[in-house]
Amino acid sequence: MIDYISGKIAELGPTRIVIDNSGIGYSIEISLQTYAALEGKTEAIVFIQQQINQRDGTEVDYGFASKAERELFQLITSVSGMGAASARMILSSLTADELRDAILSENINTLKSIKGIGLKSAQRMILELKDKIVKGEGTTDTALFTTESNAAVDEASSALLMLGFAKPNINKAIQAILKANPKASVEQIIKSALQML
Protein backbone atom coordinates (compact mmCIF):
# COMPACT_ATOMS: atom_id res chain seq x y z
CA MET A 1 0.00 0.00 0.00
CA ILE A 2 1.24 3.49 -0.88
CA ASP A 3 1.66 5.80 2.13
CA TYR A 4 2.65 8.97 0.26
CA ILE A 5 3.86 10.24 -3.11
CA SER A 6 6.28 13.12 -3.46
CA GLY A 7 7.35 14.94 -6.58
CA LYS A 8 6.66 17.84 -8.90
CA ILE A 9 3.11 19.09 -9.30
CA ALA A 10 2.31 18.47 -12.98
CA GLU A 11 -1.36 19.50 -12.68
CA LEU A 12 -3.42 20.94 -9.84
CA GLY A 13 -7.17 21.51 -9.75
CA PRO A 14 -9.75 21.86 -6.95
CA THR A 15 -10.53 18.13 -7.05
CA ARG A 16 -7.45 16.49 -8.58
CA ILE A 17 -3.66 16.65 -8.58
CA VAL A 18 -1.11 14.95 -10.83
CA ILE A 19 2.27 14.34 -9.17
CA ASP A 20 5.26 13.63 -11.40
CA ASN A 21 7.54 11.17 -9.59
CA SER A 22 10.51 9.84 -11.63
CA GLY A 23 8.69 10.43 -14.90
CA ILE A 24 5.46 8.73 -13.80
CA GLY A 25 2.35 10.88 -13.36
CA TYR A 26 0.14 9.87 -10.44
CA SER A 27 -3.45 11.13 -10.68
CA ILE A 28 -4.88 11.67 -7.20
CA GLU A 29 -8.30 12.87 -6.04
CA ILE A 30 -8.11 15.71 -3.47
CA SER A 31 -10.32 17.93 -1.29
CA LEU A 32 -10.49 21.72 -1.40
CA GLN A 33 -8.49 21.79 1.87
CA THR A 34 -5.58 20.01 0.17
CA TYR A 35 -5.96 22.15 -2.95
CA ALA A 36 -5.71 25.33 -0.85
CA ALA A 37 -2.64 23.97 0.99
CA LEU A 38 -0.81 23.07 -2.26
CA GLU A 39 -1.85 26.00 -4.46
CA GLY A 40 1.15 27.96 -5.70
CA LYS A 41 3.67 25.21 -4.89
CA THR A 42 5.77 23.42 -7.50
CA GLU A 43 6.50 20.28 -5.44
CA ALA A 44 4.45 18.39 -2.89
CA ILE A 45 4.21 15.39 -0.60
CA VAL A 46 0.71 13.93 -0.78
CA PHE A 47 -0.43 11.34 1.78
CA ILE A 48 -2.44 8.59 0.09
CA GLN A 49 -5.58 6.68 1.06
CA GLN A 50 -6.57 3.99 -1.45
CA GLN A 51 -10.28 3.26 -1.75
CA ILE A 52 -12.14 0.70 -3.86
CA ASN A 53 -14.95 2.20 -5.92
CA GLN A 54 -18.05 0.21 -4.91
CA ARG A 55 -19.75 0.67 -8.29
CA ASP A 56 -17.10 -0.68 -10.64
CA GLY A 57 -14.40 -2.12 -8.35
CA THR A 58 -11.67 0.28 -9.55
CA GLU A 59 -9.06 1.64 -7.13
CA VAL A 60 -9.11 5.37 -6.47
CA ASP A 61 -6.27 7.20 -4.72
CA TYR A 62 -7.30 10.07 -2.46
CA GLY A 63 -4.53 12.46 -1.47
CA PHE A 64 -4.07 14.82 1.46
CA ALA A 65 -1.65 17.62 2.24
CA SER A 66 -1.29 16.36 5.83
CA LYS A 67 -1.54 13.10 7.75
CA ALA A 68 -4.10 14.80 10.00
CA GLU A 69 -6.50 15.38 7.09
CA ARG A 70 -6.04 11.77 5.95
CA GLU A 71 -6.88 10.54 9.46
CA LEU A 72 -9.99 12.72 9.45
CA PHE A 73 -10.97 11.21 6.08
CA GLN A 74 -10.53 7.72 7.58
CA LEU A 75 -12.66 8.70 10.56
CA ILE A 76 -15.49 9.94 8.32
CA THR A 77 -15.41 6.85 6.09
CA SER A 78 -15.65 4.65 9.21
CA VAL A 79 -19.24 5.90 9.64
CA SER A 80 -21.69 3.32 8.26
CA GLY A 81 -23.00 4.36 4.86
CA MET A 82 -20.41 7.13 4.45
CA GLY A 83 -18.24 6.68 1.37
CA ALA A 84 -15.07 8.32 0.11
CA ALA A 85 -16.95 10.78 -2.12
CA SER A 86 -19.01 11.99 0.86
CA ALA A 87 -15.87 12.28 3.02
CA ARG A 88 -14.16 14.38 0.36
CA MET A 89 -17.24 16.61 0.08
CA ILE A 90 -17.25 17.10 3.86
CA LEU A 91 -13.53 17.96 3.91
CA SER A 92 -14.09 20.40 1.04
CA SER A 93 -16.98 22.09 2.84
CA LEU A 94 -15.77 22.31 6.47
CA THR A 95 -12.41 22.77 8.18
CA ALA A 96 -11.36 20.25 10.84
CA ASP A 97 -12.37 22.76 13.54
CA GLU A 98 -15.81 23.37 12.01
CA LEU A 99 -16.44 19.65 11.64
CA ARG A 100 -15.34 18.94 15.21
CA ASP A 101 -17.52 21.73 16.59
CA ALA A 102 -20.55 20.59 14.55
CA ILE A 103 -20.22 17.01 15.81
CA LEU A 104 -19.49 17.89 19.46
CA SER A 105 -22.32 20.43 19.62
CA GLU A 106 -24.62 18.05 17.66
CA ASN A 107 -25.26 20.79 15.10
CA ILE A 108 -27.24 18.79 12.54
CA ASN A 109 -27.95 21.88 10.41
CA THR A 110 -24.25 22.53 9.77
CA LEU A 111 -23.74 18.93 8.66
CA LYS A 112 -26.92 18.97 6.56
CA SER A 113 -25.68 22.10 4.77
CA ILE A 114 -23.04 19.91 3.07
CA LYS A 115 -24.11 18.70 -0.38
CA GLY A 116 -25.19 15.06 -0.24
CA ILE A 117 -25.53 14.90 3.56
CA GLY A 118 -29.13 14.43 4.69
CA LEU A 119 -30.72 14.27 8.12
CA LYS A 120 -30.00 10.56 8.68
CA SER A 121 -26.36 10.84 7.55
CA ALA A 122 -25.82 13.86 9.82
CA GLN A 123 -27.37 12.04 12.80
CA ARG A 124 -25.28 8.94 12.11
CA MET A 125 -22.06 11.00 11.94
CA ILE A 126 -22.81 12.60 15.30
CA LEU A 127 -23.75 9.27 16.88
CA GLU A 128 -20.71 7.37 15.57
CA LEU A 129 -18.02 10.08 15.76
CA LYS A 130 -18.79 12.12 18.88
CA ASP A 131 -17.21 9.66 21.35
CA LYS A 132 -14.25 9.03 19.03
CA ILE A 133 -13.53 12.76 18.84
CA VAL A 134 -13.85 13.23 22.61
CA LYS A 135 -11.54 10.24 23.22
CA GLY A 136 -9.08 11.40 20.57
CA GLU A 137 -9.41 8.15 18.60
CA GLY A 138 -8.69 7.90 14.92
CA THR A 139 -5.89 10.42 15.13
CA THR A 140 -2.34 10.51 16.36
CA ASP A 141 -2.30 14.27 15.90
CA THR A 142 -3.95 16.24 18.70
CA ALA A 143 -3.86 19.28 16.40
CA LEU A 144 -6.52 17.63 14.25
CA PHE A 145 -9.28 18.60 16.66
CA THR A 146 -7.85 21.71 18.27
CA THR A 147 -8.04 25.40 17.57
CA GLU A 148 -5.27 27.76 16.51
CA SER A 149 -3.63 27.51 19.97
CA ASN A 150 -1.92 24.24 18.96
CA ALA A 151 1.35 25.08 20.72
CA ALA A 152 -0.48 25.72 24.00
CA VAL A 153 -2.46 22.49 23.61
CA ASP A 154 0.67 20.43 22.90
CA GLU A 155 2.49 21.93 25.88
CA ALA A 156 -0.46 21.46 28.23
CA SER A 157 -1.01 17.86 27.01
CA SER A 158 2.65 17.01 27.62
CA ALA A 159 2.56 18.51 31.11
CA LEU A 160 -0.62 16.60 32.03
CA LEU A 161 0.80 13.35 30.63
CA MET A 162 3.90 13.82 32.82
CA LEU A 163 1.60 14.31 35.80
CA GLY A 164 0.26 10.81 35.13
CA PHE A 165 -3.13 11.48 33.55
CA ALA A 166 -4.42 9.27 30.70
CA LYS A 167 -4.33 10.73 27.18
CA PRO A 168 -8.06 10.13 26.40
CA ASN A 169 -9.02 11.94 29.62
CA ILE A 170 -6.61 14.78 28.84
CA ASN A 171 -8.02 15.17 25.31
CA LYS A 172 -11.59 15.21 26.63
CA ALA A 173 -10.76 17.86 29.25
CA ILE A 174 -8.83 20.04 26.78
CA GLN A 175 -11.65 19.89 24.21
CA ALA A 176 -14.13 21.07 26.87
CA ILE A 177 -11.77 23.87 27.97
CA LEU A 178 -11.14 25.07 24.40
CA LYS A 179 -14.84 24.99 23.60
CA ALA A 180 -15.43 27.42 26.47
CA ASN A 181 -12.27 29.46 25.83
CA PRO A 182 -10.63 28.90 22.40
CA LYS A 183 -7.76 31.27 23.21
CA ALA A 184 -6.82 29.71 26.57
CA SER A 185 -3.13 29.93 27.54
CA VAL A 186 -1.03 26.93 28.60
CA GLU A 187 -1.47 27.87 32.28
CA GLN A 188 -5.24 28.29 31.92
CA ILE A 189 -5.58 24.93 30.12
CA ILE A 190 -3.52 23.09 32.77
CA LYS A 191 -5.30 24.74 35.74
CA SER A 192 -8.75 24.04 34.29
CA ALA A 193 -7.80 20.48 33.33
CA LEU A 194 -6.50 19.74 36.83
CA GLN A 195 -9.89 20.72 38.25
CA MET A 196 -11.65 18.41 35.77
CA LEU A 197 -9.36 15.35 35.89
Image (cartoon, grey):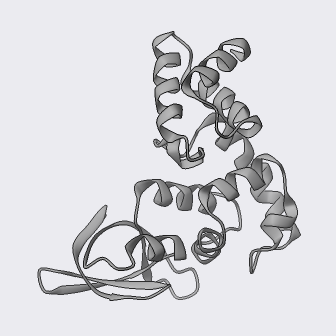
Q: Where 152 sits versus 102, above or below?
A: above
Relative to 1, does residue 171 appear above or below in the rendering?
above
Which residue appears at 69% of the width and 19% of the height?
Answer: 192
Q: Is residue 178 above or below residue 10?
A: above
Quadrant assignment, res 21: bottom left
Rendered location of residue 4, percent (x, y): 29, 64
Counting the numbered discs, the total is: 0
**Image quadrant for the C terminus?**
top right
> Where residue 101 sits: x, y (%)?
73, 51
Residue displayed at 47% across by 53% down: 68
Q: Is residue 2 visible?
A: no
Which quadrant holds residue 95? bottom right
Horizontal side, residue 156 vs residue 178: left or right: left
Residue at far left of view: 22
**Residue displayed at 66% across by 66% down:** 94
Tell me where residue 6 sits by quadrant: bottom left
Is residue 49 or residue 179 the one in the foreground?
179
- In percent of width and height, residue 164 lies at 51, 10
At horizontal 58% and vertical 86% (from top left) the residue drawn is 55
Q: Looking at this view, is 96 or 118 the one in front?
A: 96
On the rendered structure, is 25 left or right of 137? left
Decide which of 37, 62 is in the foreground and name it: 37
Locate the N terminus and report the quarter of the image it occupies: bottom left
Examine the rendering and report whether any part of residue 87 can be seen: yes
Is residue 148 placed above or below 33 in the rendered structure? above
